[in-house]
Amino acid sequence: MKTPVYEERCDLPPGFRAAGVHAGIKADASKPDMALLVSDVPDTLAVGMFTTNKVKAAPVRLDQARLANGRARAVVINSGNANACTGPQGERDALEMGRLTAGALGLAEEDVLVCSTGTIGKPLNLDPIRKGIGMLAEGLRADGGPDAAQAILTTDTRPKMCMTRIPVDGKEVTLSGFCKGAGMIEPNMATMLAYICTDAVVEPESLREAVRTAVNQSFNRISIDGDTSTNDSVFVFANGSAGNAALSPEHPDWSLFQTALNGVIFDLAMKIVWDGEGMTKFIELRAKGAVSDAEADKALRAVANSFLVKTGWAGTYPVWGRIADVLGYCGVEIDPDAMGIEYNAIPVMRGGMSAGTPKETLDAVISENRYTITVDLGTGGSGTAVLYTCDCTEEYVRINMF
């Protein structure tokens, strides 16, 4: 099987166009604040996965309803305002954004999705949005992906893009995406928006399963600060313009397609961690020896979201004792006399006690900007999990003091 090659670009597949503009939602005219992504192909498949937070922003509820038929042609996005906790007016504003976009594009309202990101609890000002939708519709370009990627950012320090091309039935198929996210990031989605496009022909139910598989091992495996947000959304669009035989698990190229989709979405998720608010260290957490995968996952989430642990990482401090403490209270089954902890496969705790690792050996690991911590819960079980997270610095506090 061909191994996909991933590039930090957002060349849209044939049949897609995008744009990003400054509409005036944000005061700084140098920062674009609205984006539009459109498929020119009728009957484009669309799959969405959304936040598990019960407090869902108005656009999330709208999109969940519109994606019930598995089809969408466009998504309009504003940054600077989340349109969350805005009551009936927020619902009307989300509908109005969709209606205006549909009119500008000549589409049915049901074909248009709406996304917002930014400050929670503040009503939208539709005046700049009305202007912005017109600008976006006029500015749509086949090479507009990078502009759209820039326009959706909030506290991000840089746009996040990834693409790859694979052969399917002897035809070139493109998968390309962009996302935003830097804070309020917790597994099961976060303050993040992600958009992935492909020109592949895919069976609808197969696409839904492929997206679920890809998201569960990427966006649902990251945590910056343990906060699940109100607006989290991942969309995958497939317009079928490549003309291949419909992909499904029975297709000989299905594994390659799933691998490529996994890779693009995983790359975008890792870019979110690397751009975590104020982060200086990328930590890969692994658990083994749990009674179940669910228990292993619960243990890692507790470690990743402990600010006592995260600030220790920031201070280049050997926090294995703090990690052991978290494992003891997080509510999973452990054997404290058989637990172990490793840093880059170097044992620092063995049998519930210090492994006697020389300080200089451990210091060499924790001074790096990326390393892996593996915890063994000591139960002898086969449960495992992996999670990707980062440290917490003073800069995170400063960013979130507004």
Image (cartoon, grey):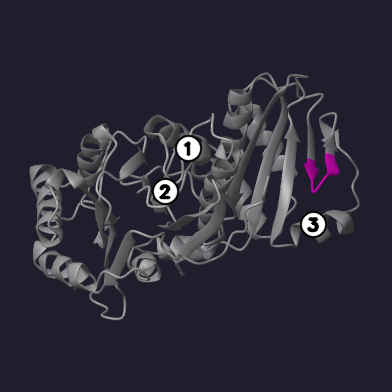
Q: Nearer the viewer, residue 379 or 154?
A: 154
Q: Nearer the viewer, residue 22 or 257?
A: 257
Q: Residue at x 34, y 66 (%)?
A: 148
Q: Amino acid at mark 2?
A: Gly
Drawn side of residue 124 relative to residue 8, left or right: left
Main SS, magenta residues: strand
Q: Secondary structure at mark 2?
A: loop
Q: Amino acid at mark 3?
A: Val
In the rendered image, the quadrant that contains the C terminus is bottom left
Q: Is 162 covered by the magenta stretch? A: no
**Corner quadrant of residue 91:** top left
Mark linked to residue 243: 2
Q: Earlier in the sequence, mark 3 or mark 2?
A: 2
Measure the alpha-carbon separation of dots 3 and 2.
49 Å
Given contact means CB atoms under 8 Å apart, are the residues at marks 3 and 2 in contact?
no
Measure the alpha-carbon separation of dots 3 and 1.
44 Å
Q: Residue at x 59, y 36 (%)?
A: 252
Above or below, 368 against 375 in this view is below
Q: Earlier in the sequence, mark 3 or mark 1?
A: 1
Mark linked to residue 365: 3
Q: What is the x, y in percent for residue 126?
A: 10, 62
Crowding around mark 3 (Cα neighbors within 10 Å: few <14, some 14 to 19, many 20+) is some
In the rendered image, which residue does mark 1 sit on? 247
Q: What is the x, y in percent for residue 232?
A: 36, 46
Q: Amino acid at mark 1?
A: Leu
The magenta segment is 342-348
Numbered-mark total: 3
Image depth: mark 3 or mark 1 in front: 1
Q: Secondary structure at mark 1?
A: loop
Q: What is the x, y in percent for residue 351?
A: 85, 29
Drawn side of residue 186 relative to residue 91, left or right: right
